Each structure stands twice: as C-alpha cells, then as structure tokens.
Amino acid sequence: MKSDLQHIALIMDGNGRWARKRGLTRIKGHTAAEKSIHDAVEVCDELGIKYLTLYAFSTENWSRPKAEVSFIMKLISRFIKTNINDMDKKNVKLRVTGRLNDLPEGPRRELQQAMERTSSNTGVNMILALSYGGRAEIRDAFVRIAENVKSGLLNPEDISEVMISDFMYNSDVPDPDVIIRTSGEQRLSNFLLWQSAYTEFVFTPVLWPDFHAEQLKQALSEFKSRKRRFGGLK
Ligand code: FPP
C-alpha cells in the first residue's frame, strides 16, 4: 500500500551497543548496520516514500577515536562500491547532505561518482547525511545570505523563512514528516534543526542493526496514529 509520506529521516543509533552485547568490537556494529540501510530503502520504495535521509556521520563524530572514524569512512566507500549497481537498477537517486569536502578523498570520489551516475533516477532519493550538523548547515546558510546582502543582491527586509529554506543544503527536499531514532536515545543530536520545526518524532529502543523492514513499518504506523496540526486546530 502506498503511503502519503514524502520524507522520512532516520538517526541510526546503537551500533556500538549492539556489538558490545555480542562481545564484538564497535566496528562490527557499523558493519551490521548495512542490512538495516538496505531495508529502509526497500520500505521507502515499496511505500512510495520519495525521500529518505540517513544520519550516517555528524560533524561531532569526527571526535571519535581515529581508528573508528577511518573504519566508517572505508565502510562508506565499500558500501557505495558494492551497492551502486543495485541502487541504480532500483532507480535510487543517491544524494548527500553535509560538508562533503570534509571527507577523505576515497569516499568523496565514490560518492561523487555514484551521485552523478544516479542523478537522473526517479525513484527513492537516498540522502546520506555525512559530516552533517544542523547548526553547521544554518551557519553556512547565514554566510551565503550575508554575502548576498553585502553584494547588494539582497535586502535584509526581504529575508523570509522560505528564502532561508532555499539557502539550506538541499532546498528542493521537503521537510521530514517524521524523524525516527533507534536505540532508546531521545534527542535530535544536531540533525535537521531548521527542517524539523513540525516534524513528528518516533523513538524506539531497537538498536539500529536490529531495525529491519518490520520495525520500520511499525515505527511508521506509530507516526500515522499522530494528529499533525502544524500549529493550527485541525
Ligand atoms: C551510531 O551508533 C552510528 C554512527 C555514529 C555511525 C553510523 C554509521 C553507519 C550506520 C555505517 C556507515 C554508513 C553507511 C552509509 C554505510 P553508535 O556507534 O553511536 O552506537 P552506540 O551509541 O551504541 O555506541
């Protein structure tokens, strides 16, 4: 059954705890995360949800131990390499949000090539948030707006909320209807701060590597039971 949802965003949390529970190293938890990513794309495809944003690496995650950061970067490269054919066949359009230039050359190049290759696909937009921070995104928008004011292209009085949205990284993407966070933590952690003004939040105790199609559908059915009023009365 098709859904009227346009955009779901996922905070993929709990990989480390999933691994620890099994006596494995943290990085094994990140490896195990791949199946859940596949499932999320499948569910969006099945339900006709056009935009899927996955919080894969935050601006704060750079402060993790060097070995873990380097492993995640390699995992991203490998993920793209091994899945690009399949993604393309499934009509998935790969995109990123965040400061892509912060990434090492390897994953950056893989991502850029994959984005080019899938740029005219019309299925699910799979948006990887990489070196992403909500405050960094708002700060970057501020800088660009200030430059436009400085050069006389923009009057401060003309700056509207819609215009600010237009200066965000992916301004064509609608605000997320729902943000789902796994692993029991109940916070936004600098994710999509500007875009989540009227977003519903679903928190689940399930750890990300255990969050498969069935768990995602369950979270979406919880979202569906909510009444969204956007500040109005109905
Ligand atoms: C959160 O779990 C996970 C991360 C910060 C990294 C997410 C990375 C991936 C899912 C893999 C790479 C992405 C792709 C696209 C292949 P955590 O480590 O914070 O878990 P914990 O809170 O239990 O320690």
Image: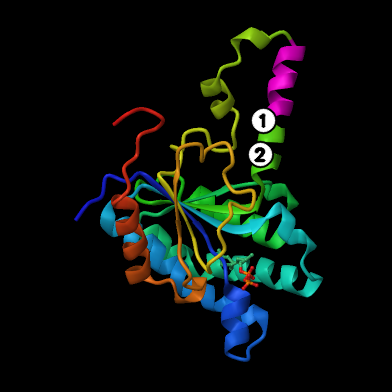
The image quadrant of residue 221 is: bottom left
Q: Amino acid type of disc 1?
A: Ala
Q: Left or right: where does residue 94 sit relative to residue 153? A: left
Q: Is residue 106 left or right of residue 194?
A: right
Of the pair 172 and 133, the residue shown nearer to us:
133
Report the quarter where the C terminus lies: top left
In the visual, does 157 lie left or right of 34? right
Residue shown at 58% from the left, 74% from the top: 15
Please state which of residues 211 and 117 is positioned toward the viewer in this rendering: 211
Q: Does the magenta portion include 42? A: no
Quadrant of the image for the N terminus?
bottom left
Residue at (58, 86) in percent of width and height: 21
Which residue matches tag 1? 141
| Residue 193 pos. (x, y %) | 59, 41
Residue drawn where x is 32% and y is 64% of the image:
218
The range drawn in magenta is 142-151
Amino acid type assigned to the residue bearing label 2 in the image: Glu
Q: Position of residue 70 (x, y in %)?
A: 74, 70
- Which residue position holds label 2? 137
Whole-number angstrom distance, CA of label 1 to CA of label 2: 6 Å
Q: Is residue 220 above or below residue 68?
A: above
